[in-house]
Image (cartoon, rainbow, N blue to C red):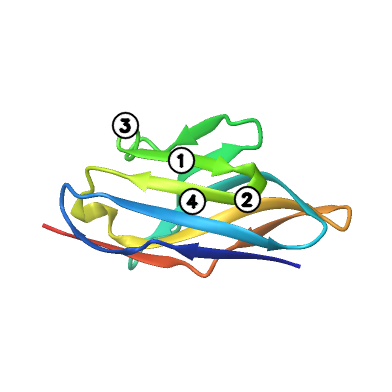
């Protein structure tokens, strides 16, 4: 079993920054790619950014140039540096990992962390 634990959410004023972290724990697993999604009230969950094991990244258009995703493979941890935050970035942010465990790939999710940006 693999668990993802997020940290780093909180409240910030528009223009500010936050850094989210997500650490995967368990045994006998290998992570292929990791990412961050978000869900605002009344809206569907949407992709924010993803990073694969080789380091390639992709970002949603609405965060391009403001957010940076990176990962520490040795620590099975992914980070999301969020800069120039806007009120519309307010959402619950979820960590996601595509993991090989027990010979099978599966998607795992963290519990979510709240990010609130005030104007």
Q: Are marks 4 and 1 in contact (CB under 8 Å)?
A: yes
Q: Dot 2: few (<14), some (14–19), or many (≥20) neighbours within 10 Å? A: few
Closer to us: 25 or 86: 25
- Secondary structure under the numbered disc 3 in the rendered image: loop
In three-dimensional space, the C-alpha distance between marks 1 and 3, rounded to whole angstroms, equals 11 Å
**x and y, in percent, of residue 94 in the image:** 48, 60
- The C terminus: image quadrant: bottom left
The residue sitting at 39% across, 61% down in the picture is 8
Tag in front: 1 or 2: 2
**Label 4 or label 3, whichever comes before in sequence order:** 4
Tag in front: 3 or 2: 2
Disc 2 marks which residue? 75
> Quick check: 116 above or below 51?
below
In three-dimensional space, the C-alpha distance between marks 4 and 3, rounded to whole angstroms, equals 16 Å
Disc 4 marks which residue? 36
In three-dimensional space, the C-alpha distance between marks 4 and 1, rounded to whole angstroms, equals 8 Å
Disc 3 marks which residue? 65
The residue sitting at 55% across, 42% down in the picture is 71
Is residue 97 shown left or right of residue 41?
A: right
**Label 3 or label 2, whichever comes before in sequence order:** 3
- Secondary structure under the numbered disc 2 in the rendered image: helix
């Amino acid at each position: 079993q693999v668990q993802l634990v997020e940290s780093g959410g909180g409240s910030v004023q528009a223009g500010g920054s936050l850094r989210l972290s997500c650490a995967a724990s368990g045994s006998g697993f290998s992570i292929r790619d990791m990412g961050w999604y978000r869900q605002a009230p009344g809206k569907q969950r949407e992709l924010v950014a993803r990073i694969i094991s080789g380091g390639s990244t992709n970002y949603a258009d609405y965060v391009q140039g403001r957010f940076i995703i990176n990962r520490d493979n040795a620590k099975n941890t992914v980070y999301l540096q969020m800069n120039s935050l806007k009120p519309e970035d307010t959402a619950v942010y979820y960590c996601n990992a595509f993991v090989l465990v027990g010979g099978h790939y599966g998607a795992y999710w963290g519990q979510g962390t709240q990010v609130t940006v005030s104007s």
